[in-house]
Image (tube, coloured by chain):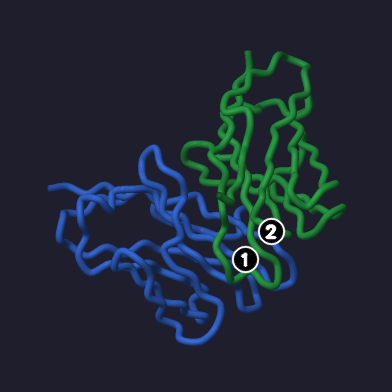
Amino acid sequence: AQSVTQPDIHITVSEGASLELRCNYSYGATPYLFWYVQSPGQGLQLLLKYFSGDTLVQGIKGFEAEFKRSQSSFNLRKPSVHWSDAAEYFCVEGRSNDYKLSFGAGTTVTVRA
Amino acid sequence: DGGITQSPKYLFRKEGQNVTLSCEQNLNHDAMYWYRQDPGQGLRLIYYSQIVNDFQKGDIAEGYSVSREKKESFPLTVTSAQKNPTAFYLCASTISGGLNEKLFFGSGTQLSVL
């Protein structure tokens, strides 16, 4: 079983609408959390990361994510989606007791005009 | 320029054959990783290594083996025991001293079975 769960396999959103991608982690202690994006035919790019401190994290391309320990979640949000945001998004959990980095299964985002 | 080099880009395996995928980095990173990417399953961790001469199994290590004799090299062998090896394989690395840093990825190797 994967330690990182992304419940939504595919999301379709209209351009200009808001986007939220869900991520749940399983590590009992404070995890390292990341969001990566993979555009079609491209490599993986880091959007943002969290380990400690402010639970609302700002990233590149207008994305943000909020760490909620009570819900074991690290959801990714963007207020207004652009067509170029169509891609696959991966949530990643790192564990402080070793260097294991586990990816979720990914959420594919389609943007319609 | 620093980076991660994976070779070959495409690899074909015959039944019962072991094949080795190469991963070399000149970033001076201590930690290295092998992932397998299949459609709909994201990246699944095969093996990872924090330092030279040490490595740990990931979530899907069966049928694979690795070595870490040099800091810059982390080759992956897909053995004949791996019954479904067709996939895209990604090697990655990150600096030591904590996990709060991004992963650097190679360009990948597509492995197919003949």
| B64 up-or-down from A27: above or below | above
In depth, the one of B15 and B33 nearer the eye is B33
Element marked by disc 1: strand
Q: Colour of chain A?
A: blue
Rendered location of residue A8, percent (x, y) = 39, 54
Left-right relation of B100 to A18:
right
Rendered location of residue B54, percent (x, y) = 85, 55
Type of amino acid at the residue the image marks with label 2: His
* Quarter of the image where the C terminus of chain B is located: top right
- Circle 1 packing at 10 Å, graded few (<14), some (14-19), many (20+), is many
- Circle 2 packing at 10 Å, graded few (<14), some (14-19), many (20+), is some
Numbered circle sitting on residue A94: 1
Q: Which residue is mark 2?
A: B29
Rendered location of residue B24, percent (x, y) = 69, 43
Left-right relation of A65 to A28:
left
* Farthest front residue in view: B1
Q: Are marks 2 and 1 on the same chain?
A: no
Q: What's the CA distance linking mark 2 and mark 1?
A: 17 Å
Q: Residue at x 79, y 53 (%)?
A: B56
Q: Which one of the lettered chains is coloured green?
A: B
Please tell me in which quadrant of the rendered image residue B19 appears.
top right
Chain under numbered label 2? B
Element marked by disc 2: loop
Q: Residue at x 35, y 72 (%)?
A: A64
Rendered location of residue B14, percent (x, y) = 70, 14
